[in-house]
Image (cartoon, helix red, strand yellow):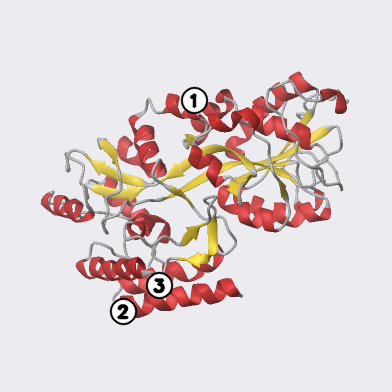
Amino acid sequence: MEALAVCNAFTDERQPPMKVTKRGLWAVGALTVTASLVLTGCTAASDDTDNAAGTGEALTVWVDADRAAVLKDAAADFTAETGVEVKLVQKEFGDIRDQFVAQVPTGKGPDIVIGAHDWLGTFVTNGVVAPVELGDTAGDFQGVGITAMSYEGQVYGVPYSIENIALVRNTALAPSTPATFDEMVTMGEAAGTEYPFLVGLDPEAADPYHLYPFQTSFGAPVFGTDADGSYDAEALEIGNAGGDEFAAWLAEQGAAGVLNTNITSDLAKEKFVAGEAPFYLTGPWNVPAAVEAGIDVAIDPIPSAGGEDAQPFVGVQGFFVSAKSENALAANEFIVNYMGSEEVQTALFEVGGRAPALTASFEAASADPIVAGFGTVGENAVPMPSIPAMGAVWEFWGVTEAAIINGGDPASLWQKMSGDIQTAIAG
């Protein structure tokens, strides 16, 4: 096995997805190919040299640098077992969505792309992804992962990671788990540290992602859902009575100094690592620094501020198949039975630190109490909306929260935000 290949393939035809339920039991004969995995010393392809999906003899996969090594090994196994060549194109993760949407309609782009679940609405409405057939493997994944990879009742991706925030507690400063937000603040004040509680905010846009579990605890989700559980853009609930209560709560916490838009994400991390707060609302990405600093941490559920469950957003990453792929059968086989295997899901967890979406891999990873703690909180989390209307929400949401925390009138600002969102969604 040589170096990672950065190569290309071409297609013009849209193919329907085909069902594959067991590795090896698929129509390899229909894909009469004998090419081996190409691993040359190419560099990442530029936008104008990316070839279209599918030559009839190969799969092209866009992947980011962090996960390229894992896919390289899985691709080699796939080629050895099926004879189908896999060509890996390394991309910056932040560039993948827009380049994929731009290239697929023109006949360019990959057969398979790595991505985040909240890209799905854009992908589906632009017609650039095809449904996938999980077959009898669907039940092997955590339910929230499959839900996140679904759009209007149809599954479009194979999840590999699940990520959410939780309450990180310094056990030396707070030996027990708080039951409510108010109890947490009281415990934090009793600890005698500079801050009773930390969450990183932006001076201009607060952080709706991190504050969302408190909003849900007031019964104010962004959107309602359809019968199948899909988010309904016409059921905007952010401005309901619970939303007004949440806005008033934001104002109270801002006035008390518990929420402070001058405490940025970097500063919040720095202060917690320095032992200046017993509680820190964050994700698994910030825990290693605290552990390395010698802090004994526990991962707790997010305490309710409004009386209902505090449900954070969950972010899911996975693999999607291009709607223009000529090799839909092979692509489906690769992402379901190779990217969805316990070996690969565990390897992706080991390089990325995100909890695996495959239940078997997650259970093994949960031997680590930090992974288990975030996973427990994630069981109560909700997928971040992937519908296109969410773009209108982000436009007004954070700036309104910041204005309220900084002393603005909560009732008028929150209702203006809700009206602006509704107007933007309506077009």
Q: Which mark is residue 8?
A: none
Residue 158 visible to an observer of this rendering:
yes
The residue where tag 3 is placed is: 400
Quick one: SS at disc 2?
A: loop
Q: Label 1: how many residues lie within 10 Å, few (<14), some (14-19) or many (20+)?
A: some
Q: CA distance from mark 3 to mark 1?
A: 42 Å
The quadrant of the picture occupied by the C terminus is: bottom right
Residue 155 on image: x %, y %: 63, 43
206 to the left or right of 420: left
| Residue type highlighted by circle 2 | Asp
Residue 258 located left or right of residue 267: left
Residue type marked 1: Ala
Mark nearer the N terminus (2 vs 3): 3
User: Distance of mark 2 from mark 1, alpha carbons?
Assistant: 49 Å
> Disc 3 or 1, which lies upstream in sequence?
1
Name the residue tied to disc 1: 360
For residue 409, the mark is: 2
Tell me the quadrant of the picture where the N terminus can be found.
top right
* Amino acid carrying mark 3 in the image: Thr
